[in-house]
Image (cartoon, rainbow, N blue to C red):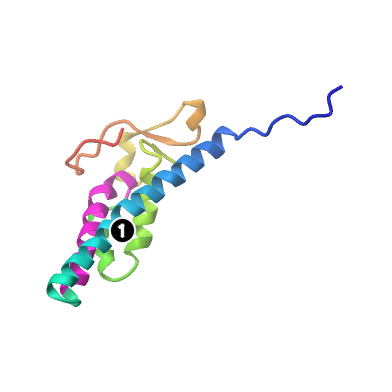
Protein backbone atom coordinates (compact mmCIF):
# COMPACT_ATOMS: atom_id res chain seq x y z
CA UNK A 1 0.00 0.00 0.00
CA UNK A 2 1.19 3.42 -0.91
CA UNK A 3 1.49 5.97 1.88
CA UNK A 4 1.52 8.90 -0.50
CA UNK A 5 -1.41 11.25 -0.34
CA UNK A 6 -3.13 12.00 -3.62
CA UNK A 7 -2.21 15.32 -5.17
CA UNK A 8 -4.49 18.12 -4.11
CA UNK A 9 -6.72 19.13 -6.96
CA UNK A 10 -8.45 22.45 -7.32
CA UNK A 11 -12.17 21.89 -7.59
CA UNK A 12 -13.99 23.39 -10.58
CA UNK A 13 -15.90 25.66 -8.21
CA UNK A 14 -12.68 27.13 -6.80
CA UNK A 15 -11.25 27.54 -10.31
CA UNK A 16 -14.37 29.36 -11.44
CA UNK A 17 -14.27 31.60 -8.38
CA UNK A 18 -10.59 32.38 -8.91
CA UNK A 19 -11.16 33.19 -12.58
CA UNK A 20 -14.12 35.37 -11.66
CA UNK A 21 -11.97 37.24 -9.12
CA UNK A 22 -9.27 37.84 -11.73
CA UNK A 23 -11.83 39.18 -14.20
CA UNK A 24 -13.33 41.45 -11.53
CA UNK A 25 -9.95 42.88 -10.55
CA UNK A 26 -9.07 43.40 -14.22
CA UNK A 27 -12.31 45.34 -14.75
CA UNK A 28 -11.65 47.47 -11.66
CA UNK A 29 -8.07 48.22 -12.65
CA UNK A 30 -9.13 48.88 -16.24
CA UNK A 31 -11.53 51.57 -15.04
CA UNK A 32 -9.79 53.12 -12.05
CA UNK A 33 -6.29 53.49 -13.54
CA UNK A 34 -7.38 55.44 -16.65
CA UNK A 35 -9.52 57.58 -14.36
CA UNK A 36 -6.51 58.47 -12.21
CA UNK A 37 -4.37 59.11 -15.28
CA UNK A 38 -7.02 61.44 -16.69
CA UNK A 39 -7.19 63.29 -13.38
CA UNK A 40 -3.42 63.78 -13.35
CA UNK A 41 -3.37 64.99 -16.96
CA UNK A 42 -6.12 67.51 -16.40
CA UNK A 43 -4.64 68.49 -13.04
CA UNK A 44 -1.26 69.22 -14.61
CA UNK A 45 -2.83 71.28 -17.40
CA UNK A 46 -5.56 73.22 -15.57
CA UNK A 47 -4.58 72.81 -11.92
CA UNK A 48 -5.99 70.63 -9.22
CA UNK A 49 -9.56 71.57 -8.65
CA UNK A 50 -13.14 70.56 -9.27
CA UNK A 51 -12.55 70.18 -13.01
CA UNK A 52 -9.89 67.52 -12.46
CA UNK A 53 -12.05 65.73 -9.90
CA UNK A 54 -15.11 65.67 -12.16
CA UNK A 55 -13.04 64.55 -15.15
CA UNK A 56 -11.71 61.66 -13.04
CA UNK A 57 -15.28 60.50 -12.50
CA UNK A 58 -16.14 60.50 -16.21
CA UNK A 59 -14.48 57.15 -17.02
CA UNK A 60 -15.93 55.14 -14.12
CA UNK A 61 -19.38 56.69 -14.58
CA UNK A 62 -19.38 55.76 -18.27
CA UNK A 63 -18.23 52.20 -17.51
CA UNK A 64 -20.86 51.82 -14.79
CA UNK A 65 -23.63 53.09 -17.06
CA UNK A 66 -22.51 50.75 -19.86
CA UNK A 67 -22.25 47.57 -17.75
CA UNK A 68 -25.16 48.20 -15.35
CA UNK A 69 -27.92 46.53 -17.45
CA UNK A 70 -25.90 43.30 -17.57
CA UNK A 71 -25.73 43.17 -13.76
CA UNK A 72 -29.39 43.94 -12.96
CA UNK A 73 -28.59 47.54 -12.15
CA UNK A 74 -29.95 50.67 -13.80
CA UNK A 75 -27.85 53.08 -15.84
CA UNK A 76 -28.69 55.91 -13.46
CA UNK A 77 -26.76 54.09 -10.73
CA UNK A 78 -23.66 55.56 -12.35
CA UNK A 79 -24.61 58.83 -10.67
CA UNK A 80 -23.63 57.27 -7.34
CA UNK A 81 -20.02 58.08 -8.27
CA UNK A 82 -20.88 61.72 -7.54
CA UNK A 83 -21.87 61.09 -3.93
CA UNK A 84 -19.48 58.35 -2.82
CA UNK A 85 -20.65 54.72 -3.08
CA UNK A 86 -19.87 54.49 -6.80
CA UNK A 87 -16.78 52.33 -6.31
CA UNK A 88 -18.82 49.82 -4.28
CA UNK A 89 -21.58 49.68 -6.89
CA UNK A 90 -19.05 49.27 -9.69
CA UNK A 91 -17.31 46.47 -7.76
CA UNK A 92 -20.62 44.61 -7.45
CA UNK A 93 -21.32 45.19 -11.15
CA UNK A 94 -17.84 43.96 -12.10
CA UNK A 95 -18.27 40.85 -9.91
CA UNK A 96 -21.58 40.06 -11.58
CA UNK A 97 -20.41 40.77 -15.13
CA UNK A 98 -17.36 38.54 -14.61
CA UNK A 99 -19.70 35.52 -14.58
CA UNK A 100 -21.73 36.63 -17.63
CA UNK A 101 -23.87 35.30 -19.28
CA UNK A 102 -24.67 33.27 -16.13
CA UNK A 103 -26.20 34.97 -13.11
CA UNK A 104 -25.99 33.80 -9.52
CA UNK A 105 -28.35 36.47 -8.17
CA UNK A 106 -32.10 36.77 -8.40
CA UNK A 107 -33.20 38.76 -11.44
CA UNK A 108 -35.46 41.78 -11.22
CA UNK A 109 -39.11 41.07 -12.18
CA UNK A 110 -38.80 42.86 -15.53
CA UNK A 111 -35.77 40.70 -16.42
CA UNK A 112 -37.37 37.29 -15.83
CA UNK A 113 -38.80 36.88 -19.37
CA UNK A 114 -35.26 37.15 -20.80
CA UNK A 115 -33.69 34.61 -18.44
CA UNK A 116 -33.72 30.83 -18.28
CA UNK A 117 -32.71 28.55 -15.42
CA UNK A 118 -29.39 26.91 -16.31
CA UNK A 119 -29.43 23.13 -16.66
CA UNK A 120 -25.70 22.94 -17.30
CA UNK A 121 -24.07 20.88 -14.50
CA UNK A 122 -21.10 23.24 -14.36
CA UNK A 123 -23.35 26.27 -13.78
CA UNK A 124 -26.10 24.62 -11.75
CA UNK A 125 -28.14 27.03 -9.68
CA UNK A 126 -27.64 30.02 -11.96
CA UNK A 127 -29.73 31.95 -14.43
CA UNK A 128 -28.74 32.14 -18.08
CA UNK A 129 -29.32 35.26 -20.15
CA UNK A 130 -31.35 34.04 -23.14
CA UNK A 131 -31.50 37.35 -25.03
CA UNK A 132 -29.77 40.71 -24.58
CA UNK A 133 -31.50 43.54 -22.80
CA UNK A 134 -33.52 45.81 -25.03
CA UNK A 135 -32.47 48.84 -23.01
CA UNK A 136 -28.77 48.04 -23.24
CA UNK A 137 -28.43 49.30 -26.80
CA UNK A 138 -25.34 47.23 -27.49
CA UNK A 139 -24.32 43.63 -27.93
CA UNK A 140 -24.38 41.14 -25.10
CA UNK A 141 -21.30 39.90 -23.27
CA UNK A 142 -21.59 36.29 -24.43
Label 1: how many Cα within 10 Å (few below 14, some 14–19, many 20+)? some
Q: Which residues are magenta?
A: 51-72
Q: Is residue 112 visible?
A: yes
| Residue 14 or residue 51, whichever sits in front | 51
SS for tag 1? helix
Depth check: give the residue in front, 98 or 74.
98
Quarter of the image for the C terminus: give it.
Answer: top left
Q: Main secondary structure of the magenta part?
A: helix
Q: Is residue 106 magenta?
A: no
Say which quarter of the image contains residue 117: top left
Q: Would you name the residue on which mark 1 appears?
A: 32
Q: Quadrant of residue 104?
A: top left
Q: Position of residue 86 (x, y in %)?
A: 32, 63
Q: Name the quarter where the N terminus is drawn.
A: top right
Please state if 100 lies on the left or on the right of 59 as rendered: right
Q: Give residue 42's position: percent from left, percent from top.
A: 16, 68
Image point (35%, 66%), residue name: 85
Give the answer, above or below, for where 45 lies relative to 71.
below
Query: Does the magenta-highlighted stretch encompass residue 62?
Result: yes
- Going by the picture, which residue comes out furthest to the right? 1
Considering every residue shown, the one lying at the far left of the view is 46
Residue at x 19%, y 71% (from the top left corner): 43
Quarter of the rendering containing residue 92: bottom left
Amino acid sequence: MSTEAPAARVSPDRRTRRLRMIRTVALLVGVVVPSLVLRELIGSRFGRGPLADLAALAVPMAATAWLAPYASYRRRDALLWLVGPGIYVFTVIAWRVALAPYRDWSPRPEEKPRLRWSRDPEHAGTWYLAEPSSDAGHTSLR
